[in-house]
Image (cartoon, rainbow, N blue to C red):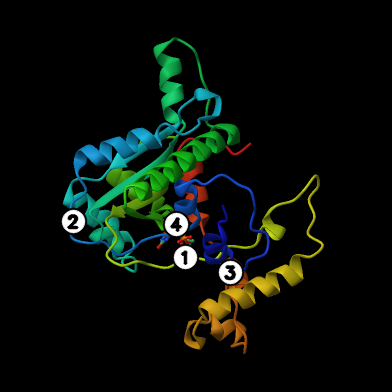
Amino acid sequence: MSYETEWRARFGQETGVPADVPEAPWLRQVLMRRTHRRYAERTVPSSLLRLLLAAAFSASSKSDFQQASVIHVEDPSVRKRLAGLVPDMPWIDTAPVFLVFCGDAHRLERIGELRGHSVDNGKLEGFFNATVDAALTLQTFILAAETVGLGCCPISVIRNHADAVAAILELPEKVFPVAGLCLGYPAVAGHISMRLPLEVTLHTNRYDEARLGEAVDAYDRRRDARYSIPREQQRSSEVFGHTAFYGWSEDKARQATEPEGLSFSAYLRAHGFVME
Ligand SMILES: Cc1cc2nc3c(=O)[nH]c(=O)nc-3n(C[C@H](O)[C@H](O)[C@H](O)COP(=O)(O)O)c2cc1C
């Protein structure tokens, strides 16, 4: 079986398609997956949502510590307050379901209290483990939801308002938002976001970036052939000007020059974490 169609959709090229591999419809679906930000006016049954959450919490968990928590934002007034923090992403308000996936380093300390052991889970290790657990739970939820025809959009920008989010959701110390998640039946087909080729992201036996420059150039061209970023969308042109060819790497390099998450770092330090 060949995954050529899906491979081309994901990477924009035919090279490297594995041969002699088992047929698995779910793998085809994962290769073709995409984020959805527009949703049909169709309710997601609460029983289905519960099943998807059960699947999500089936994700692997570091040391079986189970340090993810999800807040299901059911109250429209609570949702409005969250959506109001990020007015340029209206899908936070319009999605049929909105969840907030949190790293939860707090619960392990509470469990320590229940069993009479003093647990300090507020160091970098505790933060990192809780973050990874929450991320795995988030992605497992997304893949489970997509399996039954739903679409999702993670929302990490809420971390730029972590204090307000924590106040609205009444998060205790050492519980922090990793990302919100919009969920609903897709209103439109959407499009596949092309990924860097495995020659960039996969290394064999040792880290090797010898051909990074040319591989990224070729990737930029493939992406541009499918979808060109319009000139008026060249980021921070007042600082960097316009370029004749504006590809993914120029866009992401410009984006990454802008600091993000400074308030999140302050939030974590003010809410029980010591990053050592
Ligand atoms: C942790 C995380 C946070 C994200 N945060 C946002 C967000 O705040 N707003 C948004 O519209 N999309 C967000 N996204 C969606 C990404 O933009 C999207 O996954 C990326 O462009 C690749 O597209 P694809 O998922 O369709 O392949 C987020 C994705 C992840 C994994």
Looking at the rendered structure, the kind of residue marked 3 is Gly
Q: Determine whether the residue tagged by mark 1 lies in a helix, strand or loop.
A: loop
Q: Determine whether the residue tagged by mark 3 lies in a helix, strand or loop.
A: loop
Q: Which residue is mark 2?
A: 42
Q: Nearer the viewer, residue 14 or 237?
A: 14
Is residue 270 something that shows in the picture? Answer: no
Query: Crowding near pointer 1: few (<14 within 10 Å), some, many (20+)?
Result: some
Q: Which residue is mark 1?
A: 192
Q: Which residue is mark 3?
A: 12
Query: Crowding near pointer 3: few (<14 within 10 Å), some, many (20+)?
Result: many
- Which residue corresponds to the image point at 39% horizontal and 13% vertical from the top-left? 114
Vertical order, 55 against 228 (above or below)? above
- Asked if disc 4 is less than 8 Å from ligand 1, the answer is yes
- Identify the image quadrant of residue 8: bottom right
Distance between the Cα atoms at labels 2 and 3?
Answer: 33 Å
Query: Crowding near pointer 4: few (<14 within 10 Å), some, many (20+)?
Result: many
- Can you tell which mark lies on residue 33? 4
- Asked if disc 1 is less than 8 Å from ligand 1, the answer is yes
**Answer yes or no: do the residues labelled 1 and 4 have beta carbons within 8 Å?**
yes
- Whichever of labels 1 and 4 marks the residue nearer the N terminus, that label is 4
Vertical order, 79 against 11 (above or below)? above
Looking at the rendered structure, the kind of residue marked 2 is Arg
Is residue 17 something that shows in the picture? Answer: yes
